[in-house]
Amino acid sequence: MPDMSASASLAMTHLVSFAAEVDEDKVTPGVLGFIVFAVMALAVWGLMKSMNKQMGRIKFKEGSDSDIEEASAAAKGSAKGSGRE
């Protein structure tokens, strides 16, 4: 059976030398940053797709200007009748 302490110290030696080579002034997001960004992009894409589907289900019929004026006059009349102004 191989000696685990020897291989562990060898691995630590390689990691320490690698850490010394890393420039402390240069920071990059790395793989984790890419994964987080990709997940967020997929979530936004899914939300936009869902919103498009929901907006497509809305039935909207635009009334003419006379219909709008009649509705606002009726609303004002009901407000006067209830004692609110």
Image: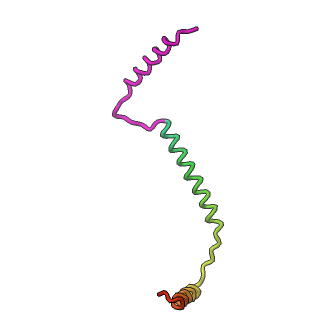
Look at 57% across and 48% down and name the residue there. 42
User: Over which residues does the magenta segment extend?
Assistant: 1-30
Q: Position of residue 49 (x, y in %)?
A: 61, 56
Q: Is 14 in front, or is 73?
A: 73
Image position, residue 10 (x, y; %): 46, 14
Verify whether residue 16 appears in magenta.
yes
Name the main secondary structure of what is drawn in magenta: helix
Q: Is residue 56 magenta?
A: no
Task: Answer above or below: position of 76 versus 44.
Answer: below
Which residue does the image show at 54% across and 91% down from the upper left?
Answer: 81
Along the line of sight, which residue is nearer the eye, 84 or 24? Answer: 84
**Quadrant of the image for the N terminus?**
top right
Q: Position of residue 15 (x, y in %)?
A: 44, 21
Query: In terms of image quadrants, where is residue 55?
Result: bottom right
Question: What is the residue that sits farthest to the left in this orientation?
Answer: 25
Above/below status of 76 relative to 31: below
Which residue occupies the extreme front position in the image?
A: 83
Q: Quadrant of residue 51?
A: bottom right
